[in-house]
Every structure is written in structure tokens, then in C-alpha cells.
Image (tube, rainbow, N blue to C red):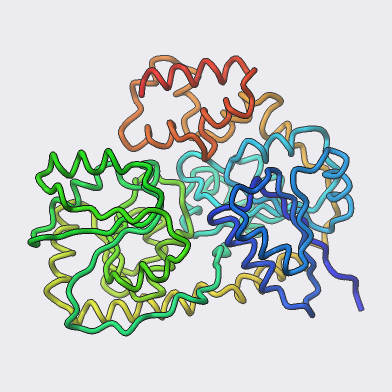
Amino acid sequence: MSPPIKVLHITAHLGGGVGKALSGLVLNTPPESAVRHSIICLETPKKTQFLRQLVNSGCQVTIAPSRATLFGLIEASDIVQIEWWGHPATIAALCCDSLPAMRFLLWCHVSGIHTPIIPSRLIESSHRCIFTSPCSYEATEVMQLFSTHKEKMDVIHSAGDFNGFEMPNRKSDEPLMAGYLGSLNFAKLHPRYVEFLAAIDLPDFTIRMIGDIVSRDVLEKQSREAGHPDMFEFRGYTADVASELADINILPYILNPQHYGTTENALLEAMSMGVVPIVLNNPAERALVINRKTGLIVRTPQEFGDAVTWLANHPESRQRIAREAAQSIRNNFVVRKMSEAFNRHYTSSCEVDKTVIPFTTIFGKSPAEWFLACQRHPEYFTTDYKLSLIDEFTLPGLIEQSKGSIFQYHKYFPKEERLSQWAQRLEALE
């Protein structure tokens, strides 16, 4: 019997989507499988839900390793899988020194269409480049490299299981009950979300907002100015998402056109419970929702308002779409399929020799260069007058405190003068 394939995952943290994806992959790898997973978590997890699941399953998780430990674990592994979304801790670890030779598999948890991008040289240097959504094929770097590197590219959705997300008994005569699940940060939520909601021509329309209430003050102010002061019901963060989803039947999931997401776990969880999504015609959402079959796709506030009214007036069609949505998600986003797909790539990757990956050539040698390497528009930072080109959709992502923003990089590398200057200029613009 051949020895197991030892796969080492390097991730900045185990929160949110990546935590769910990795725990889903590891926990659903059968004991008889020829693959053994271990994880390096570069930061101490702030939320331990997925960490506990992984440790309890017997998976080795090493937190904030020393350089010697990092090198030793890489050398002992057959495959090193980098969980990519442009996090500064990940790039710092990769560029800390010349790492040992490895078989390098890249799993991209952002689309790469907008910031943070998937650098061309990172794709070229990988032995396998796996996307979490087919929308990544629309990213500039991917399109440029597709003809020469398509053999190494694939899409594997970062699916978690839907245990506990059972579809409730939805009745055709139940009233319209709207809710939004996910980040309220305007880097993700559409900056004009209230404008879309205000286009709904239904009396006493309200929407339940499920998630951290970071933008509550702004949303409430905008709703008052739009003449709908009682439109929002803020529920805050909850670990019991299924109970919230059981009480709604439509999901106005209108996101910033430049958001960085791919798999959109919140959207999938809602659809799996028969909540009908209404989404914009953004690349990631187009890859998940089939218009008029598993949800509705709109382009403007007027189209959105008409879609909500149509769902209110056609409950039987709403039920049909709800059933189609739940069936589609449960058939296509299955952790078993994710595990099997990765196992195929692990097996084929072992047929190539380990190589030394020139990460400092890919990203540069300083934190400022690392930051610029992940920007769709580095000129916003390197050229003063380009700041005037930043629009309402780009700005929220740039002023994030996380997600690879200038402020996150400045927090990690406070002594880097260029990062400090760029952060100050962006603060002034904000």
C-alpha cells in the first residue's frame, strides 16, 4: 500500500468562509482516503468554531509557527496548499526566506476580478491553481494566462455541509418575509442598498438584517432620508443562522459590483433552505443563481423593485423557485464532491517534482511591494492625482480595516514608511 499523501494547508486564519471550507474539506476526507491533511494557521484564531472541529477530528493544526517549524512542516509535506486571499500574514510567511522546495497548490478564495487580485506570477509558479468560482476566469490575469496554463486551472467550490439547514415547510399563502444575511460592510453590501429597497412598491415593507451591525447607523440614516425610517430590523450576529433563515422567504442580496467574494456561503445557505435570492448581475452571483429558475437577477433599483413585487404577487412561482434553489445547492455544493475533486489534484500533483517557488520575485521584498502586488489599481497609491479616480464602489474596499487593505498592511508593518504615507492619504480622501 502506498503511503498517504501529506497535504499541508497554509492559511492566515480559520475564520469565516475559509474556516468553513477547510473544516468541510478535512472533516469529509474519509479515513480510508490516501490523503492526510494538516494546517498551519499563521494567526491565533479569534473565533474558534472551526479550529475546535478540526482539532477534534484529529487534524494537526499548528498556530503561529516559528520559521524553523514552518520550514520543517513544508519539508515533511508532499503538497503545500496556500489558501489565497491576499492576506499580509500569508505573503510575509511566503517571503520570509527561501522556503524549501514544494509541490505548490493554490486555492483562491477571492475572485481576482477586483482587488485583491491573483498575481500572474503566483498562478504561473503554482503546480495547480484552483478557483472557488468560475467567475475567476473573468479576471484579467487568468484570461491572459489561460491559453498557456489552462491545464493547471480548475474550479472547486468551497462547499461546507448543509447539516442543520433543513428546508422548512413553506406554504404558498405565506406573506413576503425579506431578510439579508452576511456582511453589512459596504465593501460587500451595495453602497446604495437603501436606494434599491426604496424602489419596492409594497406597503409596510421591512427587511431583517442578519450579521454584524457595522453599518447600522449609515443604513438607518439613509432609510430615514428615503422616507422609510422603519424599514430595517437589525438582528446582529448569530450562530443560529438556520433559525433566522426559516423565518424569511426572500433574500435581497444586492452586493457591491466590485466585491471580492466567490462562493458566497450566506447566499448558498439561504438558497439551501428555500429562500429565494434576488441578486445583481455580478460575476460571482451569476455563477450561483439561474435567473427565474433558482432566483432572480436584476440590474437596476427599478428592476429590483419589480422583482420583489412579482414575488409578492406570484406565491406559487416563488415556491417553485424556492424548491429549485434548494435542490440546486444541495446537488451541486456537496462537500463529498469537493473532497473527491481535491484528491484527484493531490494525486496528479505528486507526479511532479518539488520545486523552489520564488515568492520574493512574485511579490517583492518589502511589505509595500507585497501590498501593491495585490492591487488591481496600484496607481491609486503610487500616483497622487489618481486618487480622484476612486469611485463609490471602489472606496469601501480600499478603506476596509481587513481584507488586505492598506490599513491592514499598515497595522502589520507600522514601520514601513510608504504604507504609512498611503494610509494617511487614503484617510484624507475618505
- Depth check, front residue: 66 or 211: 211
Q: Is residue 281 left or right of residue 45?
A: left
Residue 102 in the image: above or below residue 279: above
Residue 207 in the image: above or below residue 312: above
The quarter of the picture where residue 67 lies is: top right
Please give the name of the residue rendered at 66% of the width and 40% of the height, measured from the top-left corner.
121
The quarter of the picture where residue 294 lies is: bottom left
Please give the name of the residue rendered at 55% of the width and 48% of the height, measured from the top-left corner.
142
Residue 133 in the image: above or below residue 427: below
Q: Is residue 429 left or right of residue 415?
A: left
Q: Is residue 392 left or right of residue 37?
A: left
Please give the name of the residue rendered at 20% of the width and 83% of the height, measured from the top-left corner.
172
Residue 313 in the image: above or below residue 125: below
- Depth check, front residue: 295 or 43: 43
The quarter of the picture where residue 415 lies is: top right
Task: Tell me the quadrant of the picture where the C terminus can be found.
Answer: top left
Please give the name of the residue rendered at 32% of the width and 71% of the height, measured from the top-left corner.
275
Whole-percent x, y for residue 375 in the image: 52, 33
- Depth check, front residue: 372 or 6: 6
Whole-percent x, y for residue 194 in the image: 21, 47
Task: Tell me the quadrant of the picture where the N terminus can be found.
Answer: bottom right
